[in-house]
Image (cartoon, coloured by chain):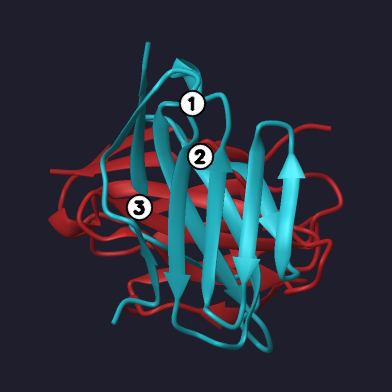
Chain colours: A red, B cyan
C-alpha cells in the first residue's frame, strides 16, 4: 500500500506571496492532519480534515487554511507569507482521526518551505 | 507546564546497551500514546503506539504506559548505531481532539559503536 505523499517537496517563496501544499493520504484513510515543524517550536498541529470538513484547528493565524476533497486528498494554503513561516510542513493520515485502539497517524515526507 | 514533556537530551548510549526515553503528559483525558522516530531531514516514522496501562513489546522496543502517573516510556534494547535519531513522544487526547497529536520536544539519541 502506498504511503502518504506530499507535493511539492521543496519550495522557495518571498514574503507576501501565497503557497499551496498538497497531500494524498494512504488509500482508505479519511482523516488528514497538518503539522508545522520548526527548530524552535517543534511539531505543532495546524488542522485536521475528515470527509471534507475541518473538525479541529490549532492555534495558527487565519493566513493558514486548508481543505479536503471527496477523494480525501487535502491541500493547505498559506497567504501573505512571512519569514517565520519557513518550516517543514507535514501531513499525516489516519483512518478516522479518533482516539481508538486502531488509529495511528502516518506521516508524509513533508514539504520544506523557505520564505525569503 | 508543557502539555507533553520528554527527558532532556541528548542521550548517548554504547552499542548493545538499553536506551530509555521518558515522556510525561498533562492532560488526564489523553487516550492514545505514540513514539515516532525522526532521522535528520526526514519525516517522523511511527515506532510504537500504546493505549492500555502496562507494557507493550515489539522486537527490540518496549513501550510502557502508566496513566495514573501520566507517564509513558520507550525502551530500546540492544541499541544499534542505526537507532541514532530524534525520538518524539506524541499524545492523542480523547473526545473532540480529532486528529490532533501533541508532541514533546523530542530526545536526540546517539548510539556509539
Horizontal relation, residue A74 to residue B90: left or right? right
Mark identifier at residue B37: 2
* Residue at x-position 41% and y-position 32%: B85
Give how far across and how far down residue A77 sits, in percent: 43, 60
Question: Secondary structure under badge 3?
Answer: strand
Nearer to us: label 1 or label 3: 1
Q: How many marks?
A: 3
**Disc 3 versus disc 2: distance between alpha carbons?**
14 Å
**Disc 2 versus disc 1: distance between alpha carbons?**
9 Å
Chain of the residue under the numbered disc 3 shown in the image: A
Ranked by sequence position, the earlier of labels 2 and 1 is: 2
Residue at numbered disc 1: B83
Chain of the residue under the numbered disc 2 shown in the image: B
On the same chain, marks 1 and 3? The answer is no
Mark 2 nearby-residue class (10 Å; few <14, some 14–19, many ≥20): many
Question: Secondary structure under badge 2?
Answer: strand
* Residue at x-position 50% and y-position 85%: B27
Considering depth in this image, is A58 or A72 the residue closer to the camera?
A58
Q: Can you say which quadrant of the picture contains the C terminus of chain B?
A: top left
* Residue at x-position 24% and y-position 64%: A80
Considering depth in this image, is A105 or B110 the residue closer to the camera?
B110
On the same chain, marks 2 and 1? The answer is yes
Nearer to us: label 3 or label 2: 2
Horizontal relation, residue A17 to residue B14: left or right? left
- Position above or below: B40 against A104: above
Mark identifier at residue A37: 3
Question: Are the two marked residues, 2 and 1, in contact with CB atoms closer than 8 angstroms?
Answer: yes
Q: Can you say which quadrant of the picture contains the N terminus of chain B?
A: bottom left
Mark 1 nearby-residue class (10 Å; few <14, some 14–19, many ≥20): some
Amino acid at each position: 500500500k502506498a504511503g502518504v505523499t506530499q507535493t511539492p517537496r521543496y519550495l522557495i517563496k518571498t514574503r507576501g506571496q501565497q503557497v499551496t501544499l498538497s497531500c494524498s493520504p494512504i488509500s482508505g484513510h479519511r482523516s488528514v492532519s497538518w503539522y508545522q515543524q520548526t527548530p524552535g517550536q517543534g511539531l505543532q498541529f495546524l488542522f485536521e480534515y475528515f470527509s471534507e470538513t475541518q473538525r479541529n484547528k490549532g492555534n495558527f493565524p487565519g493566513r493558514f487554511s486548508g481543505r479536503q476533497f471527496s477523494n480525501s486528498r487535502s491541500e493547505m494554503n498559506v497567504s501573505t507569507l512571512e519569514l517565520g513561516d519557513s518550516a517543514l510542513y507535514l501531513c499525516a493520515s489516519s483512518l478516522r482521526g479518533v482516539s481508538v485502539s486502531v488509529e495511528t497517524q502516518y506521516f508524509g515526507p513533508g514539504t520544506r518551505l523557505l520564505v525569503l | 507546564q508543557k502539555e507533553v514533556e520528554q527527558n532532556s537530551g541528548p542521550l548517548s548510549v554504547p552499542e548493545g546497551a538499553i536506551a530509555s526515553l521518558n515522556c510525561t503528559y498533562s492532560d488526564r483525558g489523553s487516550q492514545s500514546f505514540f513514539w515516532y522516530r525522526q532521522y535528520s531531514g526526514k519525516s517522523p516514522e511511527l515506532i510504537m503506539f500504546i493505549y492500555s496501562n502496562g507494557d507493550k513489546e515489539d522486537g527490540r522496543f518496549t513501550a510502557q504506559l502508566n496513566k495514573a502517573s501520566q507517564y509513558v516510556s520507550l525502551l530500546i534494547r540492544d541499541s544499534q548505531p542505526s537507532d541514532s535519531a530524534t525520538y518524539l513522544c506524541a499524545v492523542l487526547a480523547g473526545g473532540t481532539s480529532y486528529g490532533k497529536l501533541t508532541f514533546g520536544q523530542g530526545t536526540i539519541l546517539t548510539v556509539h559503536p
